[in-house]
């Protein structure tokens, strides 16, 4: 099972919006509303920012939003702040005969 | 407040085994599945498997089947991940992570341990 496909890096200026894509297949992203997104700062454990495609956990800024179209999920960060600079990973359940979880390769966000 | 506290860093020889612990507190231990995720240096996240603390049923990623064993001790609210036949490619930070769906899993992780660095080197 290959990793979900994410851009290796994205950048945006303070206050702008950016979108990170996460492309899977009809066996994972396309079939289930079970995509989650994690933010990871250097040397720290990941932190969930979106779950079940578009839901935000309590305490996560509403500047983070998630969506899905076909086999591609997306994370949008609006009003970029310096502290948003981090690595971002998408994650999806893989169904059919496999009980499995798959991550994207990660996207490094630079805030200019 | 949910806390997952993992055991300390390990250095192992190729071919050896390592056992990492993850002690849970702040919630009803039996109610929530625990997943294990690893991250090789400068690499992405990789799911290893999951354990249901009620009954101890496990599901492992195909890549690790035959080499990984996840267990739990309900008396101490601790989950363990043992990886055998270690090779240099197993050098990574290993995380435990809680699934917040009580009694099941929706395959997302709301709380993570601090990570345990396992270094495999001769």
Image (spheres, rainbow, N blue to C red):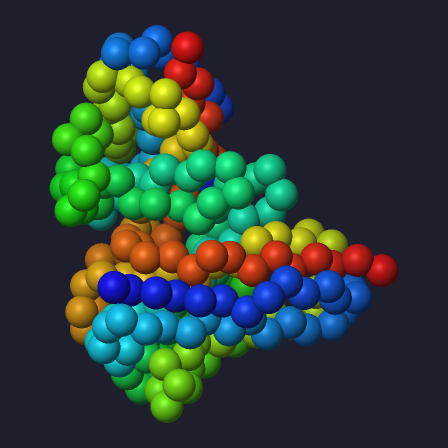
Across and down, in percent, residue A77 comes to 25, 23
Give B56 or A39, whichever is nearer the viewer.
A39
Residue at 46 percent of width and 26 percent of height: A108
Give A5 or A38, whichever is nearer the viewer.
A38
**Residue reaching furthest right?**
B122
Residue B35 seen from this side: no
Residue B27 placement: quadrant: bottom left
Number of callouts in the render?
0
Residue B101 placement: quadrant: bottom left
Answer with left or right where residue B116 lies relative to residue A73: right
**Residue reaching furthest bottom?**
B75
Q: Is residue B9 above or below residue B56?
A: above
Q: Is residue B71 above or below residue A80?
A: below
Q: Is residue B8 above or below residue B106?
A: below
Residue A36 seen from this side: yes
Give A4 or B54, whichever is nearer the viewer.
B54
Residue at 42 percent of width and 39 percent of height: A40
Residue at 31 percent of width and 86 percent of height: B55
Across and down, in percent, residue A80 comes to 28, 18
Answer with left or right where residue B108 lies relative to residue B48: left
Across and down, in percent, residue B65 comes to 53, 68
Residue at 59 percent of width and 66 percent of height: B8
Answer with left or right where residue B24 lies relative to residue B99: right
Across and down, in percent, residue A72 comes to 27, 29
The C terminus of chain A - image quarter? top left
């Amino acid at each position: 099972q290959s990793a979900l496909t994410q851009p290796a890096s994205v950048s945006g200026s303070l206050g702008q919006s950016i979108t990170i894509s996460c492309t899977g297949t009809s066996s994972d992203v396309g079939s289930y509303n079970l995509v989650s997104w994690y933010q990871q700062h250097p040397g720290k454990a990941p932190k969930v920012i979106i779950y079940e495609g578009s839901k935000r956990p309590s305490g996560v800024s509403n500047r983070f939003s998630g969506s899905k179209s076909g086999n591609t999920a997306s994370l949008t960060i609006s009003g970029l702040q310096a502290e948003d600079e981090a690595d971002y990973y998408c994650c999806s359940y893989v169904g059919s005969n496999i009980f499995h979880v798959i991550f994207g390769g990660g996207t490094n966000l630079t805030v200019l | 407040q949910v806390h997952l506290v993992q055991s300390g860093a390990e250095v192992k020889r190729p071919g050896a085994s390592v056992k990492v612990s993850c002690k849970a507190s702040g919630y009803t231990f039996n109610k929530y599945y625990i997943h294990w995720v690893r991250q090789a240096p400068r690499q992405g996240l990789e799911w290893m498997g999951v354990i249901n603390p009620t009954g101890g049923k496990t599901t492992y990623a195909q890549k690790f089947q035959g080499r990984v064993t996840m267990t739990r001790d309900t008396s101490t609210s601790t989950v363990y991940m043992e990886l055998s036949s270690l090779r240099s490619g197993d050098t990574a930070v290993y995380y435990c992570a809680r699934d917040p769906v009580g009694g099941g899993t929706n395959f997302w992780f709301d709380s993570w341990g601090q990570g345990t660095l396992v270094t495999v080197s001769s």
